[in-house]
Image: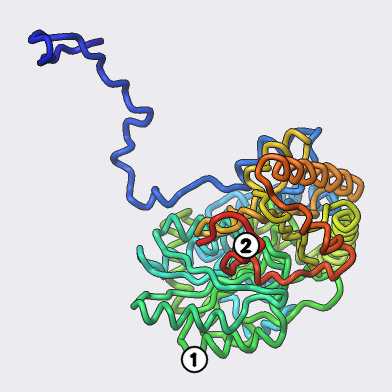
Amino acid sequence: MSSLTPDPSVGASVPVPARHPRLDPLADRYAARTHGMKSSEIRALFSVVSRPEVVSLAGGMPAVTALPLDAVGSMIGELVSGMGAQTLQYGSGQGDPRLRERICDVMALEGITDASPSEVVVTVGSQQGPDLVTRVFVDPGDVILAEAPSYVGALGVFQAAQARVQHVLMDDDGLVPEALEDALIECRARGDKVKFLYTIPNFHNPAGITLSEERRGKVMEIADRYDLLVVEDNPYGLLGFDREPMRALRARESERVIYLGSFSKTFSPGLRVGWVLAPLAVREKLVLATEAQVLCPPSLTQYAVARYLDTQPWQQQIKTFIELYRERRDACLDSLAALMPPGTTWTRPDGGFYVWLKLPRGLDAKLMQPRAVSAHVAYVPGIGFYADGQGKEYMRLSYCYPEPDQIREGVRRLARVVEAELDLHSTFDGVDTGSFRTVGRSSDRPRTPEVAELAGPASTDQIGDQP
C-alpha cells in the first residue's frame, strides 16, 4: 500500500511506500523496567545442550539419577493417594509448617541453630528468594553490591528491578574485605543508597571459590560498621568435598543477614523448593510479596520435600552426591591440566559444581562459542556473570552433570577449540603467542590462580576493553 506525498523536485505527487508494521506493536507500552531484562547466557544454551552429540559443560544440572528414584516415586505416589486433599490444595503463603521446621534442621548443619520456623518463608526454588528480597528492599536507582563475577540469575533480578550493581573484587579466598569497604566508601561519597551486599560464600557460582573463615569475620565486621544488610545465597553449602560445612554468615549475625537456601542441589531442582530465613519484620513483607506474586508455593512439592526429609536418609544421600561430584571435579581438573594450552588458568573448587576458566590473552569466550558448539562442546561465557560488560576472557565450566568420561571428552574438544582460536589470532591479529610458551602449562604451577584478576582493571597482558 502506498501514500501520495509531494516531491518538490518535480512539482507532483509520487507514491511513497508505507512503513512496515512494527514487529512488536506494543513496544512503546512496556514499563521502563523491561529495558533491564535480557536472556540468560545459560538459558540461551538449552536448545544446544539438549543435543545428544554435544557434551555440555554449561548448565549446573544436579545428578538426580543418583537419587533412589523408586523410593522417591513411591513416596510421592503415597502422598497423593493418602493426603490428596492437602497436597493438591492451596496452602499458606509462608509455606508448610512441617517443612519450615525441617528447614531449620537443615540449616543447623551450617551453624544456624537459633532459627525459628516462624522466620522461614518457603519459595518457588531459590530463584524466587533474591526476587522477593529485591522487591521488598530495592527502588530504581538503588545500589546492590555483588561479587565479581556473580550469579547470573540474581543479576537478572537486580537489572529488572532497575537497580545499579557495583561489583566487588574477589580473589582465591573469596570476597576481598578491603574492596568491600572501598566500595561502601565510594558509594557514600557519591550519595548512593546501598541496599545490600549479595554474596555466595560457599563454592561460588560461577567462580567455584569459598570465602575463607578469616574473611567471614571481617566481612561481617564491615557490615556492622557500615550498617550494611547482607543477603547470603547458599545453595551449595552442604556439598563440600574435603571438609565439614562452613559456618554460615547468618550463624554469626541474625539481624543483619538474610539467608537464601534451596533443595535444588541436595534433592531435586524439579520440585522447585527453596527458602528465605529473615527477621520477623522482614519475613512479614516477604510473605506479602509472595502472596502478591504466586499466592502460595505449591503444596505437593512442599509435602514431598518434607516427607523426603522425614523418611529418607537424606544426609547419606548428600554424601553420595559429594562423592559423585568430587570424582567429576577431579576428571575436569585433571583433563584441564593435561590438555589446555599454556596461558589458560582456572580455579580449583573444593565443593559445588563449577570451575572458572580464564582463556589465554586475546581470546573472547563469547566470540569463541559458535566454534565450540560446532565442535560439540558447550560452556557459559563469562560475560553473563557481570553487570557491566566484563568477563569476555572467562568461561564457566560445570562438571556436575556429565559422566567423567564425557567430561574428559568435553575438555578435549574445548582444548582443541582454544588452540584453534590461538592459531587464528596469531595469524590474523598479530597476537604474540610466544608469551604463552614461557609461563609453562597450568599443570606446572598451582591450579588455583588469583581470582583477583576477575574483576580488576585490565592488566598489561590483557586485550579488550575493560570498564
Residue beneath the point at 63% across and 81% down: 249
Checking the image for residue 225, the label placed there is: 1
Counting labels gives 2
Local SS, label 1: helix
Q: In terms of image quadrants, where is residue 6? A: top left
On screen, 262 above or below 81?
A: below
Residue beneath the point at 63% across and 76% down: 175
> In the rendered structure, are the residues bearing label 1 and label 2 in contact, judged by CB atoms less than 8 Å apart?
no
Mark 2: amino acid: Gly
N-term-proximal mark, 1 vs 2: 1
Residue 295 percent location from the top left of the image: 47, 55
Mark 1: amino acid: Arg
Residue 239 percent location from the top left of the image: 79, 67
Q: Is the N terminus in the top left, top right, bottom left or bottom right quadrant? A: top left
Looking at the image, can residue 124 be seen?
Answer: no
Circle 1 Cα neighbour tier, 10 Å, few/some/many (<14 / 14–19 / ≥20): few
- Closer to us: mark 1 or mark 2? 1
Asked whether 6 or 435 is in front, the reply is 435
Q: CA distance from mark 1 to mark 2?
A: 31 Å
Tell me the colour scheme of the image. rainbow
Residue beneath the point at 76% across and 52% down: 433
Asked whether 188 or 350 is in front, the reply is 188
Checking the image for residue 274, the label placed there is: 2
Residue beneath the point at 42% across and 70% down: 143
Q: In terms of image quadrants, where is residue 378? A: top right
Asked whether 455 or 234 is in front, the reply is 455
On screen, 465 above or below 174?
A: above
Circle 2 Cα neighbour tier, 10 Å, few/some/many (<14 / 14–19 / ≥20): many
Residue 331 percent location from the top left of the image: 89, 56
Answer with left or right where residue 21 lies relative to residue 59: left
Local SS, label 2: strand
Residue 170 percent location from the top left of the image: 64, 73
